[in-house]
Amino acid sequence: MYRTKTCGELRLADAGQTVTISGWVQRIRKMGGMTFVDIRDRYGITQVVFNNEVDAALCEEANHLGREFVVQITGKVAERYAKNPEMPTGDIEIEAQTLTVLNRSEVPPFTIEDESDGGDDIRMKYRYLDLRRPCVRANIELRHRMTMEVRRYLDSKGFLEIETPMLVGSTPEGARDFVVPSRMNPGQFYALPQSPQTLKQLLMVSGMDRYFQIVKCFRDEDLRADRQPEFTQIDCEMSFVNQDDIINLFEGMAKHLFKELRGVELTEPFIRMPWADAMRLYGSDKPDLRFGMTFVELMDVLKGHGFSVFDNAAYIGGICATGAANYTRKQLDQLTDFVKRPQIGAKGMVYARVEADGNVKSSVDKFYTQETLQELKKAMNARPGDLILILSGDDVMKTRKQLCELRLEMGRQLGLRDKNKFACLWVVDFPMFEWSDEEQRLMAMHHPFTHPKDEDIPLLDTDPAAVRADAYDMVVNGVEVGGGSIRIHDSELQAKMFEILGFTPEKAQEQFGFLMNAFKYGAPPHGGLAYGLDRWVSLFAGLDSIRDCIAFPKNNSGRDVMLDAPAALDQKQLDELNLAIDIRDKE
């Protein structure tokens, strides 16, 4: 038997017992004739003491241990003289009687501790060592607990967990597919699913009524902190439901997860905010409601006073940062540089301070009288000590997005984005379509199977750009953690949707004929939602990136630096797959 106890379970009540533990050497400390060795496993750390006066040979053996050696130790549990209240096992230690080295270790390339000295690249290369760190392991354990709670909740609501295939057909809408060549069907390719969208709709046609799956999805797109080329969805679909039914059930699931995993009781219904309001007030379809600073449009106040930047603008908007009038000129210049970064793209920023006496001092004072600046103060609902920040531009939506970035940065600087505070909402009534400059056509904002709002269906023939969708996203702290929609279940309406998106009937039949044909056999009204498991875990763990809650993630270039993937294939494999790539020409 390698162990009778783990390294995290011994307590003072176990004093006097003889136990065996196994694990990795965390650290070694020598004090006089005593050697103290901390042994770590998944469950915690236990201190073992080797006494030179009791067994000199055993103590000498312990002195030759190295970090990350795998060892087995038998000894007696004793009350610890210098207790450590920071450790669950801090009241006890094991007085060693035997030591067996199960495996030696080279010196690891970084310290296996929460505050590691290893950078991101080296830790990703040796991810199996990084996973030994308690802080990373805790994220994986949180992920496990979340999946178990998800399954418990959905099972209690009558859902069936059903697996769908990983090798599917490529779809032209959405992100780029990862494709897989078929050796048995030369010149033809599978795609890895971006989501099980059409398959879960077919499960509704088949009468399964309530489906879920914790499923891997794949998208070949540029990476960000909340994106990986492969990610995990909590994918769900329901029959005979409307938007309220779905929102209520999955809001209940979110509240269940908050209570069980974070001990946070959310009793109030989540806010439901139309997409148009979210864009007007926050410049984002995933607004962070942990703090205020809502946008105020200032065209009527600031336009037409001789300041050409504002006079020629299509949009002028401002935010009020409470108590920030003490910002220095250097800090304001840094904010200006921030919004002028290429990633944001603003041409500049105007600011105005509300002084203690109520007067307003602005960076464009020479263009505006104090009377006009007082109108600005009133419009912004600003008070003495507040700072007003203003952006303008010739593209309304683009300028709002720039102001959104400025708002988030101010929230960060003022300490308003507390990771232990949670602001949840639903964004609803999304536009059905968005214009693509690249494609020069309307594209589905979500996907082509989304049902338009019933009252907007007549607009499909006259003004499709004005049509709103029966779509909804759940947003927590400015992060979209899930989204879904009511689906089209009528084959004629689905055909109309494909027509607006530029599909010929033949192309629609080629790509989606299996779904449209299925609708002819009695498809029920249905809809669903997919939560991003990685995003939920990172949110609950207080992480800035989803990477540290995934066991083996990719880096920012989409590479697995541990496995060195993706990698070239040898010529024999390429030939078997009928891929016309001759690597010999490149050598």
Image (cartoon, helix red, strand yellow):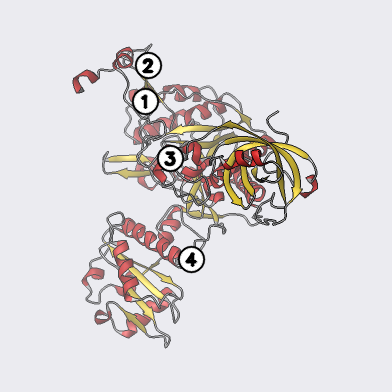
Disc 3 element: helix
Disc 4 element: loop
Cα–Cα gap, marks 3 and 4? 30 Å
240 or 66: nearer the eye? 66
Residue tagged 3: 124
Q: In the image, is residue 375 above or below residue 195?
A: below
Cα–Cα gap, marks 1 and 3? 25 Å
Classify 10 Å Cα crowding around label 3: few (below 14), some (14-19), many (20 and above): many
Determine the image quadrant of residue 276: bottom left
What is the three-letter code of the residue carrying label 3?
Met
Disc marking residue 179: 1
Pinpoint residue 320: horizontal percent, then vertical percent. Answer: 42, 71
Q: In the image, is residue 126 above or below residue 347?
A: above
Disc marking residue 107: none
158 or 572: nearer the eye? 572
Point out the tag, 4 or 2, that comes first from the N-terminus. Answer: 2
Determine the image quadrant of residue 212: top right
Pinpoint residue 109: horizontal percent, then vertical percent. Answer: 44, 42
Note whether residue 567 is visible. Answer: yes
What is the three-letter code of the residue carrying label 2?
Ser
151 or 548: nearer the eye? 548
Point out the tag, 3 or 2, that comes first from the N-terminus. Answer: 3
Disc 2 element: loop
Cα–Cα gap, marks 3 and 2? 31 Å
Disc marking residue 182: 2
Q: In the image, is residue 215 above or below residue 281?
A: above
Point out the tag, 4 or 1, that comes first from the N-terminus. Answer: 1
Classify 10 Å Cα crowding around label 4: few (below 14), some (14-19), many (20 and above): few
